[in-house]
Image (cartoon, helix red, strand yellow):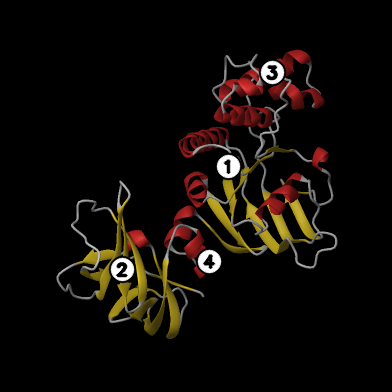
Amino acid sequence: MVEIRSNAASVVFEDVTKTYPGGTTPAVNDISLTIEAGKLVTLLGPSGCGKTTTLRMIAGLEMPSSGRILIGGKDVTRLPATDRDVSMVFQSYALFPHMTVLQNVSYGLGFSGYDKKETTSRAHAGLELVGLTGFESRLPSELSGGQQQRVAVARALVLEPQVLLFDEPLSNLDAKLRRHVREEIREIQTKLGLTVVYVTHDQEEALAVSDRIIVMNRAVIAQDGTPRELYDAPSNAFVADFIGEANIFDCEIVAVNKGQATVKLGSVELKMAARDFTPGPAKLAIRPSRVEIKTGGAANTIAGKLAKVTYVGSHLELLVEADIGNVFVLSPDVDASFEVGQAVGVGFPKGGPVLIKA
C-alpha cells in the first residue's frame, strides 16, 4: 500500500486586505503573517473578525483586494482554488451522501491523474491513517459525527496537499468527541509534518492543538504567539479576556527598574515584568486560576467579601467584592469551607498579574 506523504509548504500574507463589493469596512484589513511549513497554526477570534475570510483566501475561494499571498514561496494571489495545492475540511464535512466512504475518499484523486488501482490504494491508506479501515462500504448516514469528520480528513489527506485547511472542524460534535477528534487531528499533523491552518472560535480547542495562534479582532491581528505566550502574556485587554477569562483592573506603575515594574493595585504593591511600559496609569490582567484567596487578614492582600461560591466539580468558582472591583477566582480547593459574606483577602502570586495595553 502507498503511504500518504507530506508536501508541507509555508504560507505568507503580505499586507493583505479584503473588502467585499459594496462594502465599506474591510473583512480583513492589511494583515501580514507567516505560517511555517510543517506547523499547525490556528486563526482564532469571535464571529466576524476575519478569520474565515483569511482561510478562504488561502484556499483561493476568495481573492484579496490588495496585497500578496505566497504558498511555498510561489505567488498564488490570483490563482483560483483549482490551481492551488491546498485541501480544505469544511465545517459541514461536505460528504456525498450517495457515495460510500471509500468513494468519498477517492473522489478528489479521480481528478488528479491517478489510475484506478493507485486511487483505491491511496484511499485505503487514508482510511487507515484516520482509523477507519473496515468502514469502506458504509454510507455517511451510517457513521457517527466523529467518523464523518475523519472521512473528510482522509479525503483531504490523500491529495497530499501543501497546505491543509480546517474551517471550524469540530463545531458539530459534542464536547467529549471534540476533545477526541482534535487529538486525532493533532496526532496526524505531527506524524506527517503537515502545514495546517485551523479556524475556530473555541479558545480551549486552539490552545490544545496549535503550535501558534493568531488572534484576530475586527479584521486585524490582535496578537500572534504560542499558546503559552498568549495565555501567560496577553498583549491587550481583548486577548486577555478572549483567551480564557481574565480579571482586568486599572493600576498605577510606580517605577520601572531594569525591566521590572513596581505596580500599585489598590492597597498592595506588586512586582512584575515591565513589558516596555513606563511609569503612569496602566491596566493589569490576572487569570482567575492565579488569584489566591487568603483568610485571617493575611499580609499583602486586598480585603474583600465573598459574593458567590459555586461548586463545579473540579474546582470552586468564587466572586469577591473588593475596592478594586469584583475579582473572579477559580480555586482547586473544593473542600474549603468558603461561605457567601465571608471576609477574605485576595492575593496575587508572582507570575500571575501581567501589564497589558487597554
Residue at left 69%, top 18%?
Answer: 100
Amino acid type at circle 4 is Phe
Q: Residues within 10 Å of mark 3 (few under 14, many from 20)?
A: some
Q: Position of residue 147 (x, y in %)?
A: 57, 26
Q: Position of residue 332 (x, y in %)?
A: 27, 53
Amino acid type at circle 2 is Val
Q: Nearer the viewer, mark 2 or mark 1?
A: 2
Left or right of 198 in this view: 279: left
Element assignment for label 3: loop
Q: Residues within 10 Å of mark 4 (few under 14, many from 20)?
A: some
Element assignment for label 1: loop
Q: Nearer the viewer, mark 3 or mark 2?
A: 2
In terms of depth relative to the viewer, which is nearer, 257 or 16? Answer: 16
Q: Residue 3 occupies which quadrant of the picture?
A: top right
Q: Residues within 10 Å of mark 1 (few under 14, many from 20)?
A: some
The residues bearing labels 1 and 4 have C-alpha atoms spaced at a distance of 23 Å
Residue matched to label 4: 238
First in sequence: mark 3 vs mark 2: 3
